[in-house]
Image: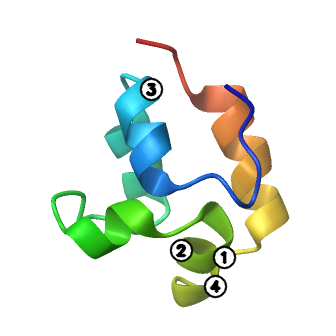
Amino acid sequence: MEITKTTSLGEILDNYKNAEEILSKFGMHCFSCPMSRMETVEEASVVHGINPDEMVKVLKKDLKKK
């Protein structure tokens, strides 16, 4: 699965075993909230004051497939 700024957090959580751990490092903790699962990487990064390109870079590097 290719991770881009338009990838939803739900897709990431469903496909990577350590997604919660990595996203938590960005200050994201509401994984059971239906709305957060629909947010894209870009939308979530803006809300949390993170550069979306940097977030994509880290996700690509650190996520491990299920």
In the shown orientation, is residue 22 left or right of residue 60?
Answer: left
- Closer to the eye: label 3 or 1: 3
Residue in the picture at 24% in, 58% down: 31
- Give residue 66's position: percent from left, percent from top: 40, 12
> Is disc 2 in contact with disc 4, using a CB cutoff of under 8 Å?
yes
* Between discs 4 and 3, the one toward the N terminus: 3
Q: Earlier in the sequence, mark 1 or mark 2?
A: 2
Amino acid at dot 2: Ala
Total tally of numbered discs in the picture? 4
Circle 2 residue: 44
Residue 48 left/right relative to 7: left
The residue at 52%/82% (across/down) is 48
Among the 4 quarters of the image, the one containing residue 5:
bottom right
Find residue 46 and name its label. Answer: 4
Question: Which colouring convention does the figure follow?
Answer: rainbow
Asked if the residue at tag 4 contacts the one at tag 1, i.e. Cβ–Cβ closer than 8 Å, the answer is yes
Q: CA distance from mark 2 to mark 3?
A: 18 Å
Which secondary structure, mark 3? Answer: helix
Residue neighbourhood size for the residue with mark 4, other residues' Cα within 10 Å, grouped as few (<14), some (14–19), many (≥20):
few
User: Where does the image place residue 17, in percent across and percent down from the top left?
Assistant: 36, 22
Position of residue 43 measured from the top left corner of the image (x, y, whole percent): 60, 78
The amino acid type of the residue labelled 1 equals Ile
Query: Disc 4 residue type?
Result: Val
Q: Which residue is mark 3?
A: 15
> Which label's residue is closer to the chain start, 2 or 3?
3
Q: Disc 1, disc 2: CB below 8 Å?
A: yes
Residue beneath label 1, please? 50
Residue at disc 4, secondary structure = helix
- Local packing at callout 3 (Cα closer than 10 Å; few below 14, some 14-19, many 20+) is some
Q: Is residue 12 left or right of residue 20?
A: right
